[in-house]
Amino acid sequence: MKIVALAGGIGGARFLRGLRAAEPAADITVIGNTGDDISLFGLRVCPDLDTVMYTLGGGIDEEQGWGRRDEAFTVKEELLAYGVGPSWFGLGDRDFATHIVRTQMLAAGYPLSAVTEALCDRWKPGVRLIPMTDDQVETHVVVDDPEHGRRAIHFQEWWVRLRASLPAVTIAPVGAADAKPAPGVLEAIRDADAVLLPPSNPVVSVGTILGIPGVRDAVAAKTVVGVSPIIGGAPVRGMADACLTAIGVETSARAVAEHYGAELLDGWLVDDADAATAAEGVEGVAVRSRPLLMSDPAATEAIARAALDLAAELAGAAG
Amino acid sequence: MKIVALAGGIGGARFLRGLRAAEPAADITVIGNTGDDISLFGLRVCPDLDTVMYTLGGGIDEEQGWGRRDEAFTVKEELLAYGVGPSWFGLGDRDFATHIVRTQMLAAGYPLSAVTEALCDRWKPGVRLIPMTDDQVETHVVVDDPEHGRRAIHFQEWWVRLRASLPAVTIAPVGAADAKPAPGVLEAIRDADAVLLPPSNPVVSVGTILGIPGVRDAVAAKTVVGVSPIIGGAPVRGMADACLTAIGVETSARAVAEHYGAELLDGWLVDDADAATAAEGVEGVAVRSRPLLMSDPAATEAIARAALDLAAELAGAAG
């Protein structure tokens, strides 16, 4: 069985761990968001790719959901002692090594997809992890800054430093329109038995991946099942509501399904708290409700199982 | 009083600490060797400059004489876990930050002298530290490798990995012939009341600095006092004997003085173990013997004091 999942960071990575447990024999390809990549200290940092890689490879800090376990911040503190920041982005010592290796390989001319494959040689995530594109795409956020007026800032500055406290006027994945899917992305989607949308941020994670020219159409041609990242009108974690508000979408499980649209989505899993959505239905989309809190590995595996079952049911109905 | 010192790494740095203590009001300019600089992991590492900066700035690992105190090697271990080496060069986590800042500034177009000044803003070494040149000079060593035949390797590979176990056929400061002294180097020498040669390696540290076009002549025009790095026929630390052998110079206090030459050197301090050299004299050079082991700060200060006294005596005799 061939499965493709489009993944952002923490929520996506945890879902993927459940997916791998639910279907150990499956051939899983993960298309990772690179829109929140950032260059810091001359190093290329790919937070979402690394969160997937560390989570599936057993290196993640389980408590915080990102970064390495048993992490110290000596290098960062020393950089700050030189007056070199930013202070608001948490790069740990172990994590630094990943970025140093990546930056060296990129400087040597390897595309990000090859770099990611090389890094995964160490972590053995049990899935094939491909960045959505080898081209540079960076999500920028336009805000009305009380001090500096309207300006565009890097997504990470908005997300991590400001904690999305300034409303986003626009969220723009700079470079996306001219980006090409990385080698293997379209092929994996084409060959997939099902495409899953984990409970990642529908705007700045899954939305950014779908925005790479060619990806949305390729995905829409398949049996697609999504897992709602919104439970009872609020994001399970993160600040997806701030992103949804920026694009004029209500923070609800139903609204996210409607935003993805019936052209893309075949099935949609919502939490029991949103059972009304399942009862009323979303036009053109099969909606099911079940517990969606990824509270432990067993619960997460059951959610992934439910998504696969729904995909199989819908593929059977279509075939 | 204006003093210039040409410094390599550990021995030079310790002597400089004694010099600063001996003459706290003096205006001291240190011209640092950059011939053992190396690029590792995409980062520019300047071991001698950093040893001087850390030693005078209070950040040095006193036990080993190089690198930072309270150091861990997490980043290096993680790099090795990715299969990225070399394993033989010890870059600690705190040290990494220095190289990251330096590399970023160099990439931004700042010359090494400006970068060094910026790094020293943090360390406040109490001296002006200038690299010998802003141009890239790297000492390479030609060896007869039993496996690979005759080949040139970076000085650090010879020194750190091989511990100078293969005899050096040639020691070549690549780029030195075309290098220009960094801004301030010739001016500092010209304005100095005395130029001191600390007990650094006479070949790959002091010799490399003197090999930058214009430096030897500028130094030779001044009152110059050197401190022998050889005590009783052996280097106090390091493997200076391997370097001296490579250039056909005997490992003795007298031979090093003769190698520097009376055109350059006015005074030469040797250890009491080499009192015979003082008794016999070296033609054209005033030789004095005294204890030269920099066993503690007081002993080191006394050595620096003796070098300054000899310089004053010789300057007085000349004037």
Image (cartoon, coloured by chain):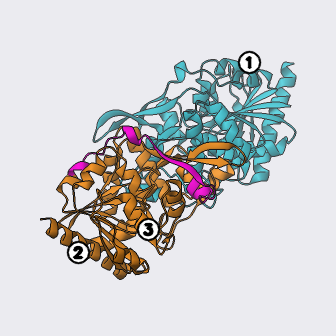
Chain colours: A cyan, B orange
How far from the left and from the top, in percent, is residue A287? 73, 32
Residue at (50% x, 39% y) in the render: A38
Residue positioned 79% across, 52% down in the render: A298
Marks 1 and 2: in contact by CB < 8 Å?
no
User: Residue at 36% of width from left, 40% of height from top?
Assistant: B179
Mark 2 vs mark 1: in front: 2
| Quarter of the image with the N terminus of chain B in it | bottom left
Tell me if residue A263 is in the magenta stretch: no
Q: State which tag comes first along the sequence, 3 or 2.
A: 3
The Cα atoms of the two marked residues, 2 and 1, are separated by 87 Å
Disc 1: host chain: A
Q: Decide if residue A236 is on the left or right side of residue A162.
A: right
Q: What is the distance, in whole Å, between disc 3 and disc 2 at their CAs?
A: 28 Å
Examine the rendered structure and indicate whether residue B20 appears above or below residue A269: below
Residue under label 1, please give it: A221
Q: Residue B60, labelled with which disc?
A: 3
On the image, numbered disc 2 is attached to which residue? Answer: B309
B156 or A134, which is in the foreground?
B156
Which amino acid, by three-letter code, is at mark 1?
Ala
